[in-house]
Image (cartoon, rainbow, N blue to C red):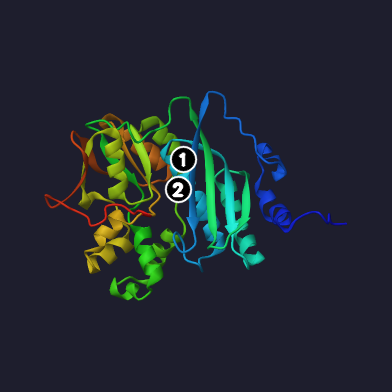
Amino acid sequence: MPDSTESAEERLIARYLRPLATHPGALGLVDDAALLTPPPGCDLVLKTDGVIAGVHFFLDDPAEGIGRKALRMNLSDLAAKGAKPLGFLLALALPAGTEEAWIAAFACGLGDDAERYGCPLLGGDTDHTPGPISVSIAAFGAVPHGRMVRRSTAKIGDRVLVTGTIGDAALGVKLRGDASLSARWRLDRTMARHLEERYLLPLPRNALAEAVLHHAAAAMDISDGLVGDLGKLCRASAVAAEIDIARVPLSDAARAAIAAEPALIETALTGGDDYEIVLTLAPEKLSTFRAAADAAGVLVTEIGHVQAGEGACFMHNGDALTFARPSYSHF
């Protein structure tokens, strides 16, 4: 016979979230807190990030993808620190009238990625909100003691590299909001789908985390755009970086869009949502890092170098570009 004192919130947690809490420290999600012991000789790496309907995703985006994206955003930061995922906390705020089918799909996507990346749910909170759906995740990872890769340790003479391709998600957001852009940008169906999928579902580079740990001098994930995030790394490290825009890796879809509308290069470089890694490393480590990236199946591209000075300079045909808004910002 059902327990008459069990609330609707408790039933929601039991049905959709408890199956994701496979770590013993989650205590079956029946306690007020969880337990997490880092592996011997390791430091904990802590990260929190979230998504809000109407800000980070469209209201009619698939619920399964929203769950995946919320976790992957945090996993991307762990990868850039060279950390191995250990688990995460979830704060989920739902407006009145949220259908149970939405919650089920959200939990399904989140659970699939929690298993895929070895990052189980440890606990969290569920709330009602008068505003839009909000999903906040705090992720935990582990690195050998004192070895976390920071953004403040780039050295003059380092090479600057990025993973994957840049700008797809920012272009995908524009396309998601206005499907007619596909024809204006001369995209075929495959290209348009690629850009939209890169917005909907980031590809965190956790397979490269160990290589980043062993080779990178400094690193951070690219969430607010390559221009702005590399600028943050340079400021933290008190160095400058010179980047050759012609070497920045672009997908075929992004190249086609930019060829049709050259001003979109600024969107690609500053728009954000890439969830790739920008890193610096000593020249003598370049070949071994490339080999490790090849083994992990992750594209890496050298795009510039670190030098004395301040800030990141993006060069095109010998001229330094300026940007109206160098970085995505909520404020």
Amino acid under disc 1:
Leu
* Residue at image mark 1: 78
SS class of the residue under badge 1? Answer: helix
Of residues 170 and 305, which is closer to you in this image? 170
Indicate which label's residue lies in the foreground, 2 or 1: 1
N-terminal-most mark, 2 or 1:
1
Residue furthest to the front in view is: 130
What is the three-letter code of the residue carrying label 2? Pro
Residue at the far left in the pictured view: 318
Q: Are marks 2 and 1 in contact (CB under 8 Å)?
A: yes
Can residue 246 be seen here? The reply is yes
Q: Which of 286 and 27 is in front in this view?
A: 27
176 left or right of 10 in image: left
- Residue that carries the numbered disc 2 in the rendered image: 204
Q: Which of 28 and 202 lies nearest the eye of the viewer?
A: 28
Identified at 25% across, 59% down, the residue is 265
Residue at point 39% right, 70% down? 177
Please state the horizontal and vertical placement of residue 169, each as a whole percent of the image.
38, 59
Quadrant location of the N terminus in the rendered image: bottom right
The residue shown at (54%, 61%) is 133
Residue 50 horizontal side relative to residue 214, left or right: right
Q: Is residue 207 visible?
A: no
Q: Quadrant of the C terminus?
A: bottom left
Q: Is residue 168 above or below residue 118?
A: below
